Every structure is written in C-alpha cells, then in structure tokens.
Image: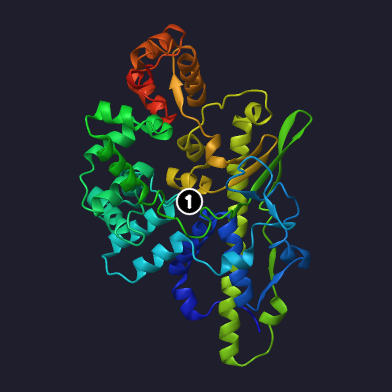
C-alpha cells in the first residue's frame, strides 16, 4: 500500500498545516514529565509507532542517572529515593490528571464565544506549577490579538473553574480571593499579610495587635481564617507537593574550561514508524485506519524533533551568555531577557516564555530551570548591570545597615547611585519587595 495524500487531504492541506503547527507548539511547551506521559499514551494506542531501542522504553521508568531526575524539594540536589527506586513513577502519573488537563476538560464543557475560549485556553497553558497566572492580561491580548476586555473576561472565567481561584497572580492574591469568596472584608488581611509576615512567623501576636490597633483575639481569628484556606490552587493535582520529579531537558558539561551542549531531550524515547505495516495489503477500512495513525505518528515525531531543535537553540543562547555563572566563575547572571532571545531566534516573545517554562538544564552548578538563567538590566552610560547584580548590591547594603537606623529605599538608591549604579527609587522598592525584605520602618528594631 502506497502512502499518498487523498483528494480530500489535499483540499484540507492548509487546515492540516495549521493543525500541525498547533500540535507542534503544544509539544514544545510541554514539560519533560508531561511529554513522557503523552509519548506513552501515543505509543500504546498507535500500532505503527515503535521504540528505536527497546532499552529506551525501559528508561521511561528507570532513569539512567540519579542526578538527572529531581524532586521538587531537592531542586539543586540529587533526587530522593524510596526503597531503592526513583520517586517518579510513570504508571502513577498516567492514572492521574494534571491541573491543566482538568481545567481544559471543564472549559470544553462550557459555552463561550471562540475568542474568550481561545484566550482561556491560552491562560490555562500559561499557568505555573502552582496554578498561578503571572504573565498578565496585556501579554494575553498581545499574543492572541484579542482585546483587553476579552482577555480579562477569559481570566475571570478561568478563575471561576474548580479549584476556584486558579489563575490568581500569586499566593497572597489567592488567599484574598478565597477569603472574599467567604464573604470576608479583606482589608485587615491585606494589612496583616503585607506588613507582618516576620511577626506572624515569630508568633508575635502582641506586636501585631498593638500596631494594627485590633485585639489579640481578633488577630488570632484572622490567622485562623488564613490557615483555613489553601495556599496553592493546584494542591492535590499531579506534579504538586507529592515528590513528583523534575526531569532535565538539556545537559551542559565543562570541557577545556568551556561549556558545551552535551545532550538534549535524551530522557525521551526515540520513536520510529513501522512503514512495513503501513504498506501492507489490507482492505479499505483498515487502510484508512493505518493512514490516519501513520499521519499522527509522523506528526508526533516531527514535533519532537522541532522541540529538540528549539531547546537546543535556546540553550546555546543561555549558556553562551551565562557561561561564567554556570562554570562558577561569577556569582552574578549577565543581563538577558526573553525579548533578546526572541529577537535572536526571530520568534514571538510568548513562544520563548512558554518554551522556557518548566524546562530544566543539568549544569556543573546543578539542575537549573531555564527561565532562572534570565536577568533584567539596569542601564548606565558607562556600564550595564544585571538585575541579579543590583539585587545583591541592595541586599549587601541592608545586611550592613545599623538595625536601629535602617536605610530607606531612597537612602539605598543614593548609595547605589554614588557607586555608579544609576537606579530609581521605585526600582529599589520593587527589588527589595521581590526579595521578601520589609520596608525600613518594619526593619527597625
């Protein structure tokens, strides 16, 4: 049986190209764990797919290097083991749903106009492992070419799905969302969480009570209510808080005092198509069945190659820019943004952003998430400083300050400017808050 396009396939050629591109992007954006599961499902249901090397099939459940499969809690260390086995189990994962899968299933049962549905699915695909949406409405609008109103409505609809609050911007936003759902006035909760995390951690109810102007009993009730809600939307779903492993997509090694890209996507089995079975002389119905599975198998193999090629290109940019950091010669990342990578590759920023999401690199410094090799910039006439350099400078100033007279953000800004790092006060405030450091008023002893 010759494999050739039928007349209807030719007529639908443009549509099929669009479908193939969408599928290729979906494979590209998958984490290695999710992609392993997808490959296993396709392998089991497609009679034309074969493993090129049977030993690779066994590698789906038996990693060949204990340092290559990481638990969430041991991000930069070797994986935990239990009874001599890796905690990651493909069979265990295959029988459970991820948060994204559950959300997509819910969206598909609801009636929306196409633009809102498309935006909602985009938001779901952009959620981080906790179920938080940090990209922002503007990025959705820009990536899909939809209005701000449509993107906002899509996010609203996603947040109404179960678990409610999925798509919030972070832990605090999620906590406040749940309290609002309970009918609570969130004003005192915002003040408590925003200003008194250190006191909460130390159990200093008396100080909180005095400064907030509420009774200790009222503060305890606030704390009780906070403890009664969930901290992440994805709790209980696959890959969250259950020692589900991270699997590196890329490995770089040091050779002759330089970094080289050693291997990409090596933890995934290499698939081939059984063309002999596809060409067998069979009846018309079986021929159509085999043609369809041949097309699907070919689509998967091409998509895996595209994913591998894209990861290789992105990784080469990352290791060339951050070589000194990855070799341990510098404690600072150099400036590198998603926009810069997108311009080099000639693709959209959202494509780079989602390519970096949930992808990991095995390096001489340990396993690092690809997006953590990015760093913003602070530009000066004489020199460009990376965000990590500026953050370290801010932390050093705060560590060395007189605790009875801590530096205000303006003081820190003046010190940095005096030392050649030209930065604005609001940027100092932003970096300080991102590092979880309180304002000068709250740092004063």
Please state the total of marks drawn on the protein image.
1
**Quarter of the image with the N terminus in it:** bottom right
**Front residue of 230 and 168:** 230
Instruction: Tell whether 348 sits left or right of 279.
Output: left
Residue 322 picture location, percent across and down: 61, 30
Q: Is 408 located above or below residue 109 in the figure? A: above
Instruction: Tell whether 59 sits left or right of 315.
Output: right
**Front residue of 318 and 224:** 224
Task: Rate crowding at label 1 as few (under 14), some (14 to 19) or many (20 or more) other CA atoms within 10 Å.
Answer: many
Tell me if residue 360 can be seen.
yes
Residue 378 picture location, percent across and down: 44, 21
- Taking the view exactly as shown, the residue that stands out farthest to the bottom is 283
Residue 364 picture location, percent across and down: 70, 35
Name which residue lies at 43% across and 6% down: 418
Name which residue lies at 34% across and 22% down: 442
Instruction: Determine the image quadrant of residue 206.
Output: top left
SS for callout 1: loop
Residue 284 picture location, percent across and down: 58, 91
Name which residue lies at 52% across and 45% down: 356
Tell me if residue 142 can be seen.
no
The image's colouring method is: rainbow
**Quarter of the image with the C terminus in it:** top left
Q: Which residue is mark 1?
A: 129
Q: Is 291 located above or below residue 182 in the figure? A: below
Q: Is 104 located above or below residue 28 in the figure? A: below
């Amino acid at each position: 049986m010759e494999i050739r396009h039928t007349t209807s396939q030719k007529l639908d050629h443009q549509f099929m190209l669009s479908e193939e591109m969408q599928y290729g992007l979906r494979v590209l954006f998958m984490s290695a764990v999710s992609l392993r599961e997808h490959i296993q499902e396709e392998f089991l249901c497609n009679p034309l797919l074969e493993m090129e090397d049977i030993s690779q099939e066994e590698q789906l459940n038996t990693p060949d290097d204990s340092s290559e499969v990481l638990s969430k809690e041991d991000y930069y260390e070797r994986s935990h083991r239990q009874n001599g086995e890796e905690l990651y189990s493909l069979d265990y994962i295959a029988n459970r749903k991820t948060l994204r899968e559950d959300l997509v299933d819910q969206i598909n049962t609801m009636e929306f106009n196409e633009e809102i549905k498309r935006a909602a699915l985009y938001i779901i695909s952009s959620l981080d492992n906790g179920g938080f949406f940090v990209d922002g409405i503007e990025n959705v609008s820009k990536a899909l070419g939809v209005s701000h109103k449509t993107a906002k409505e899509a996010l609203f609809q996603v947040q109404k799905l179960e678990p409610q609050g999925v798509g919030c911007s972070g832990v605090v936003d999620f906590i406040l969302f749940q309290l609002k759902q309970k009918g609570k006035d969130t004003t005192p909760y915002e003040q408590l969480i925003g200003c008194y995390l250190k006191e909460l951690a130390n159990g200093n109810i008396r100080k909180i009570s005095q400064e907030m102007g509420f009774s200790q009993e009222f503060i305890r009730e606030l704390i009780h209510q906070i403890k009664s809600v969930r901290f992440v939307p994805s709790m209980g779903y696959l890959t969250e808080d259950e020692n589900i492993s991270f699997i590196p997509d890329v490995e770089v090694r040091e050779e002759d005092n330089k970094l080289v890209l050693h291997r990409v996507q090596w933890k995934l089995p290499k698939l081939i198509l059984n063309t002999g079975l596809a060409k067998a002389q069979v009846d018309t119905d079986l021929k159509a069945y085999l043609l369809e599975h041949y097309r699907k198998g070919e689509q998967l193999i091409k998509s895996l190659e595209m994913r591998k090629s894209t990861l290789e290109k992105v990784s080469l940019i990352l290791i060339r820019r951050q070589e000194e950091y990855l070799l341990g010669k510098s404690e600072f990342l150099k400036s590198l943004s998603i926009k810069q990578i997108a311009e080099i590759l000639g693709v959209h920023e959202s494509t780079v952003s989602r390519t970096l999401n949930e992808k990991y690199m095995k390096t001489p410094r340990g396993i690092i998430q690809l997006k953590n090799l990015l760093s913003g910039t602070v530009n000066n006439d004489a020199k460009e400083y990376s965000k990590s350099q500026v953050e370290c400078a801010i932390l050093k100033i705060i560590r060395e300050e007189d605790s009875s007279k801590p530096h205000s953000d303006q003081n820190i800004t003046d010190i940095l400017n005096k030392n050649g790092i030209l930065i604005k006060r609001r940027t100092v405030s932003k970096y300080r808050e991102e590092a979880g450091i309180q304002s000068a008023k709250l740092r004063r002893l």
